[in-house]
Amino acid sequence: MKNPVIGIVGNVMTIEKGSFLGLERAFLNDAYISAVLEAGGIPIMLPIIDDLSLISSQISCCDGIILSGGQDIHPKFYSEPQHKHLGDVDSRIDKYQLEVARTAIEMDIPLLGICKGMQIINVATGGTLYQDLEEMNTYLLKHLQSGKTFETSHDINIDKDSTLYKLFGETLDVNSYHHQAVKKLGAGLKITSTSTDGVIESIEMNNKRLVLGVQWHPELLVAKNKDITRLFKHLIDKSKNK
Ligand code: MN
């Protein structure tokens, strides 16, 4: 049997200097690609497209999908005005990613959301976000770490009734690159881990082959902790059997 094809949702950057000044470039961080390869999948990039009616055809070549990280989601997608601490937004990217999440869930293609990707799953299912962790009274930990990407920042406490528990047990030390977090949970989702200050660190949907979101960056941790590859292996296992 062929190795499952994992579509990784790309991002867009604007070239800021040199001959191609102002040009928009589709890209993907290498760490996602190596994590998928390491786990036995064939990575391909899904570039942002504007015609959302093409998404079901675009993703039908994928056995599984990863929604990668990125900038903040425009709060208009969950009907809130912009908070003063909202970061950079690009609604063209959000529109595409939200529709990929909805379509993958509908088509029951295994889906792993990483950082912004988890927030996309939440908003796509009708949930909302804290636009900045300062909005949370309980905010204590450093969720926007500095330093090496494989360094860890805080523990998460994992719910027994979850995929993450089967893969990692009760607690896991994770990195943290977010200043936003899930507020109201989307339809059909459950919280499967939190940090000690109450920030939601992972979500899951039952009754699907796999819909799982993590607020941390497993693809950056695998460089120093091979155990983390289990998460990508799980996505690939789920992607094998229809
Ligand atoms: Mn965190």
Image (cartoon, rainbow, N blue to C red):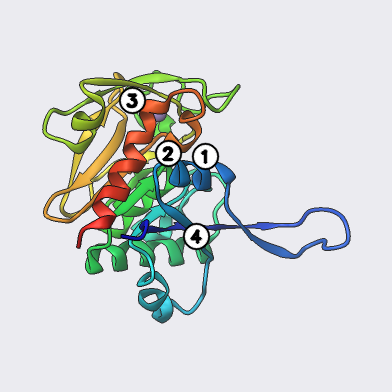
Element marked by disc 3: loop
Picture coordinates of residue 92 (x, y %)?
A: 52, 66
| Labelled disc at residue 137 | 3
Q: Residue furthest right?
A: 19
Q: Quadrant of the N terminus?
A: bottom left
Q: Secondary structure at mark 2?
A: loop
Label 1 environment density (alpha carbons within 10 Å; few <14, some 14–19, many ≥20): few
Task: Name the amino acid type tagged 1.
Answer: His
Q: Is ligand 1 closer than 8 angstroms to the Cβ of mark 3?
A: no
How far separated are the C-alphas under marks 4 and 1? 34 Å
Label 4, on which residue?
A: 44
Q: Is residue 26 left or right of residue 141?
A: right
Pair 2/4: label in front: 4
Among the 4 quarters of the image, the one containing residue 181: top left
**Disc 3: CA contacts within 10 A as few (<14), some (14-19) or many (>=20):** few
**Tag 2 or tag 3, which sits nearer the N-term?**
3
For label 1, being within 8 Å of ligand 1 is answered no
Q: Who is closer to the viewer here, 217 or 227?
A: 227
Q: Quadrant of ligand 1?
A: top left
The answer to whether any part of residue 30 appears in the image is: yes
- Please report whichever mark, 4 or 1, sits nearer to the chain's N-terminal start: 4
Identify the amino acid type marked 3.
Answer: Asn
* Relative to 87, residue 171 above or below: above
Which of discs 3 and 2 lies nearer the camera? The answer is 2
Q: Residue 172, image x and y in percent?
A: 31, 21
Report the residue marked by disc 1. 85
In the rendered image, residue 180, in percent from the top left (x then y), is placed at 42, 38
Q: Which residue is mark 2?
A: 180
C-alpha distance separating marks 4 and 3 = 41 Å
Give the side of residue 2 with respect to residue 204, left or right. right
Tell which circle, 4 or 3, labels the residue nearer the N-terminal end: 4
Lower position in the chain sequence, tag 1 or tag 3:
1
